[in-house]
Amino acid sequence: MADFPSKVTTETSSPQAQGSQQGGNSLRGLASDVTNKMDMSFIRSVPAVLMIAEIVLGLLHWALIASARYTLVPANGWVMFVAVTLWILTTILFCMILFGAIGKLPSVPWTLTVMVYHGVATILYLTAFLANAISVAPYYGYFSYGLMGGAAFFAAAVTIAYGASAYFSYMDWRGDGGNAATSTVPT
């Protein structure tokens, strides 16, 4: 009975075959690891769709601002700062929620944090939209006039998206099922 563990083998193939098999399937294994770690129920939720809209519309907004000569009007520096900063932060937050990184940090009150983030982002984007809309007139007659007008439109759209996200985040924080896809309350 003492020599039993030395007689047992757990290999199902030779070590060379295992190494080549792992090397050949490394991309397939990586893809399955990524999809296994993604929260697919979050992708199908309204807050996720709103965050994707914030990312896409925010990218369009700051790309239009960057394409114009935004340094002619000092207020556009604020617009550019808000647009780029919130675009980066929203992309990071979206990836953290999508890949479950928020589950690794249970000490952070995530529903409150997301609600405060979206509320502050709504206020900041509202100020950026107003500054952008007011600063369109000096560009009249220049090529940048259309770019700044389009940027003002997308700033309004992103402000509305952030406002809707703030509302759904508030409903989730209150526990009213604002985020139906991730709600843990049985119905």
Image (spheres, rainbow, N blue to C red):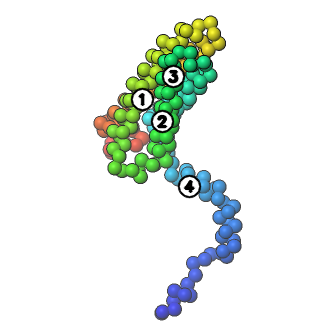
Count of marks placed on residues: 4
Q: Nearer the viewer, mark 2 or mark 3?
A: 3
Mark identifier at residue 77:
3
Q: Earlier in the sequence, mark 4 or mark 3?
A: 4
Secondary structure beneath dot 4 equals: helix
Say which amino acid is labelled 4. Answer: Asp
Is the residue marked by circle 1 packed among few (<14), some (14-19), or many (20+) residues within 10 Å?
Answer: many
Task: Tell me the distance, in whole angstroms, between the alpha carbons under discs 4 and 3.
Answer: 41 Å
Label 2–label 1 contact, CB within 8 A = yes
Q: Which mark is residue 90?
A: 2
Which sits earlier in the primary sequence, circle 1 or circle 3?
Answer: 3
Give the number of the mark in front: 2 or 4.
2
Q: Quadrant of the C terminus?
A: top left
Instruction: Report the amino acid beneath label 3.
Output: Gly
- Residue 15 visible, this orientation: yes
Is residue 151 depicted above or below 142 in this figure?
below
Q: Earlier in the sequence, mark 2 or mark 1?
A: 2
> Could you tell whether 7 is left or right of 105 in the image?
right
Q: Nearer the viewer, residue 179 or 100?
A: 100
Task: From the top left corner, tell me how far across and down residue 110 is, in percent.
Answer: 36, 43
| Marker disc for residue 33 | 4
**Mark toward the viewer: 1 or 3:** 3
Q: Amino acid at mark 1?
A: Ala
Local SS, label 2:
helix
Q: Quadrant of residue 180?
A: top left
